Image (cartoon, rainbow, N blue to C red):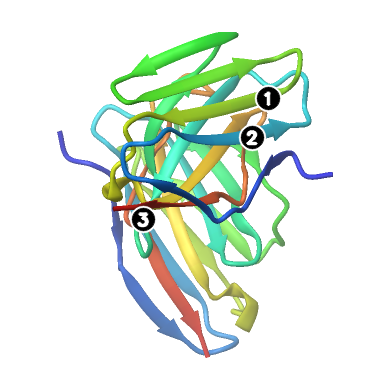
Amino acid sequence: KAGVTQTPRYLIKTRGQQVTLSCSPISGHRSVSWYQQTPGQGLQFLFEYFSETQRNKGNFPGRFSGRQFSNSRSEMNVSTLELGDSALYLCASSLARQGNEQFFGPGTRLTVL
Amino acid sequence: QKEVEQNSGPLSVPEGAIASLNCTYSDRGSQSFFWYRQYSGKSPELIMSIYSNGDKEDGRFTAQLNKASQYVSLLIRDSQPSDSATYLCAVYTGNQFYFGTGTSLTVIP
């Protein structure tokens, strides 16, 4: 069974730009969560989508948004990029039930200059 | 107070020894508990999940959960150099997952 895939793997943007990241979950998984990982803060929860609806949201500003499509694929968008947005963005997929095991994709490394 | 606390290490053990990794959490209502391994430059990889008090064994790995003490641990028996990585503890509180900042483990050949 194929794992979680994320595209692109690397991105370089400048301040003020916006970016869209994509995640395809494991086949059959309907929940997709997004995380930001930085050396100082560790893994921080952004949001979770299930059946095209945002089920939970972390404590990030509104510049961070996401959506999920009917095939469970998800996108995350960050507008008006700031230097502090430089991080590894990880997508994790899980079966429908909340609290289930999550499986991470390889991540997208975003660098904001 | 952080939701999930781990000793950042580094923790060094000789090859063949038992590595013991610990994690405490603050939310008494937490429901699910997980250990992930993350190699440098890679994404986290799930190695164990535990949902009820007691021990759960999977190969060389044993997860231990004590909800009364709000404590989760991971034991790695017969440690191998390939176990050298950062180990992340994750807790599901009913709303979201919280991750510790990880414990760096080095297994010395």
Residue at numbered disc 2:
B23
Answer with the quarter of the image where residue B93 lies: top right
User: In the rendered structure, are the residues bearing label 1 and label 3 in contact, judged by CB atoms less than 8 Å apart?
Assistant: no
Circle 2: residue type: Cys
Please determine if labels 1 and 3 lie on a single subunit.
yes
Circle 1: residue type: Tyr
Pointer 1 local density, CA inside 10 Å: few below 14, some 14–19, many at least 20: some
Pointer 3 local density, CA inside 10 Å: few below 14, some 14–19, many at least 20: some
Q: CA distance from mark 1 to mark 3?
A: 24 Å
Q: Where residue A41 sits in the image (x, y, percent)?
A: 65, 61
Q: Which mark is residue B39?
A: 3
Pointer 2 local density, CA inside 10 Å: few below 14, some 14–19, many at least 20: many
Earlier-in-chain disc, 1 versus 2:
2
Which is more toward the observer, A91 or B44? Answer: B44
Labels in figure, total:
3
Which is more toward the observer, B8 or A86? Answer: B8
Q: Which mark is residue B71?
A: 1
Q: Is residue A82 visible?
A: no
